[in-house]
Amino acid sequence: MENFEQYITPETNEAEQDALNLVQLGFEKIQLEKKVDEASVLLQELQRRRKRKYMIVLIAGLLVAVGFVFWLLGRKENKPSVPPPVEEQKVQSPLQPVAERPLTTKEKVEKPLVRGVNPDLDPDSARLLNDLLGETVNNPGAFQTNYDWGKCIQLLRAGKPKEAKLLIFQLEKRGGSSAQEAGWLLGLTLLAEGKTDKAKVIFEDISQSEAHPRRAASKKALVGIDQ
Amino acid sequence: MANSIFGWFSKEDPCRRFLSNEQLFDGLVCRDSAAIVCVQDKAFGSVRNIVRKTGLPSEMVVEVLNKSTVIFLQKIADGSYQFYGNAPVTFLVEIARNVALTALRDKKKSFDTLDNHLYIADASTAENDRHQEAADLVRLLLAGLGEPCGLIIRLQHIDGMSDEEVVNQKLTKYSTPDSLKMKRRDCMKKLTKLAQQWKISNNI
């Protein structure tokens, strides 16, 4: 702003000078207000940009958080099932095929019963069961590494047919070859329970089924039962 | 990543040029736009709280802040405010408190509400009023002055343009800075006379 003193001449009286001072004061105030108004506009623009940036960061953060949650959920679903504990893993290991020589007649009579077998089971049935279990273990087929199958054999050998049945039902639910094997094992279980008649029905069924992998074993079982 | 985000936000910081209160004060003395924006940005939150507590509408925050800033800059110019190391924003907020209370009074709120507010009588309130009256008078007189005097005076004394700029941009009919200056001198004499007459008629 130009200097107002240039408007003061020797002829300028006091009243004029007062008026000039007032005008100068007014202009100073107006200039100041204009400057502050301009700064205010800049400030408002700044606040708008700042708010926009905060919104962008907030939305980006939310998207990252949501993405992370979905990733966690996806990871949880795809996680493989927990392997059985160490003790059960030992059980899951393939059963060693039992190498058995044919029993002599004396041994057939004197051979102790299968460990833990039902004490009420007659010796012939017990011996037959033992043979059939041995044959099953020697010919595991696709079930060599199947936990339920291995455990079922163990339970039958331990004289726990009732517990073995639970696993048989698990096998049967899977259908296909598992259901076929479950049928065979059920026959062995009934035999272990002393229910020879019912076992015979199952073995007859299997022996007549051409596609059944245990057809030959079933025929052997029927021979054993009839003896 | 954090640094880049911080840098992205720091671009919006109007105070990044003023690393200390003293630097900010020096900027305000020079009426640097960046300094004014900085001090207003710092005071904005406090002024908003003051306006809310006073019961004024939220739309008045900017008005109160601007009025307070003008008063603050006047006090810096006439030496009423001296820098002793304190943050300039503190004083600005105090001025805003008084401006808000004045606005409240002007809105003719019930006198009961005034009892609940501690109104600190500012010794320079009369000074501020005098400045405001002078500004209002000048606006009134400029409007009464007519053209081209109103335009010529406004370009120089309000918009801050130099004679060369006015001539180059052909904002008036005067083609040389000297002729423009001559005309402006005449206009200022008229303006001063009008102001004198106004003072006499108002017995000031």
Image (spheres, coloured by chain):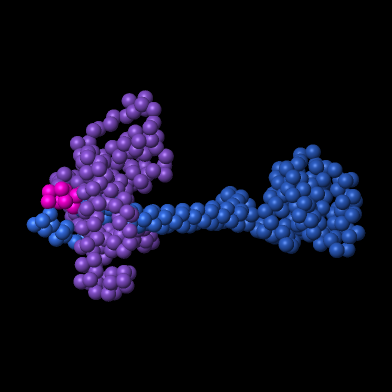
> In the rendered image, which quarter is residue A142 located in?
bottom right
> In the rendered image, which quarter is residue A115 located in?
top right
Magenta span of residues: A13-22
Q: Residue at x 31, y 69 (%)?
A: B172
Q: Tell me if I can see residue B198 in this picture.
A: yes
The blue one among the chains is: A
Which is more toward the observer, A11 or B20?
A11
Give the image location of residue A76, x and y in percent. 58, 53
Asked if residue B167 is positioned above or below residue A203 in the image, the reply reads below
Residue A8 lies in the magenta-colored region = no
Residue A15 lies in the magenta-colored region = yes
Give the image location of residue B90, x and y in percent. 24, 43
Asked if residue A175 is positioned above or below residue B61 in the image, the reply reads below
Asked if residue A225 is positioned above or below residue B166 in the image, the reply reads above
- Number of labels in the image equals 0
Q: Residue at x 72, y 49 (%)?
A: A152
Chain B: colour as depicted: purple
Give the image location of residue A85, x and y in percent. 58, 49
Name the residue at the left extreme: A10
Query: Would residue A60 be found to the left or right of residue A11 on screen?
Result: right
Which is more toward the observer, B41 or A6?
A6
Q: Residue at x 81, y 62 (%)?
A: A213
> In the rendered image, which quarter is residue A223 located in?
bottom right
Instruction: Decide whether the magenta segment is chiefly helix, strand or loop.
Output: helix
Query: Would residue A76 be found to the left or right of residue B139 on screen?
Result: right
Quarter of the image that includes the N terminus of chain A: bottom left
Q: Residue at x 24, y 60 (%)?
A: B187
Q: Tell me if I can see residue A104 in this picture.
A: no
Give the image location of residue A126, x and y in percent. 79, 47
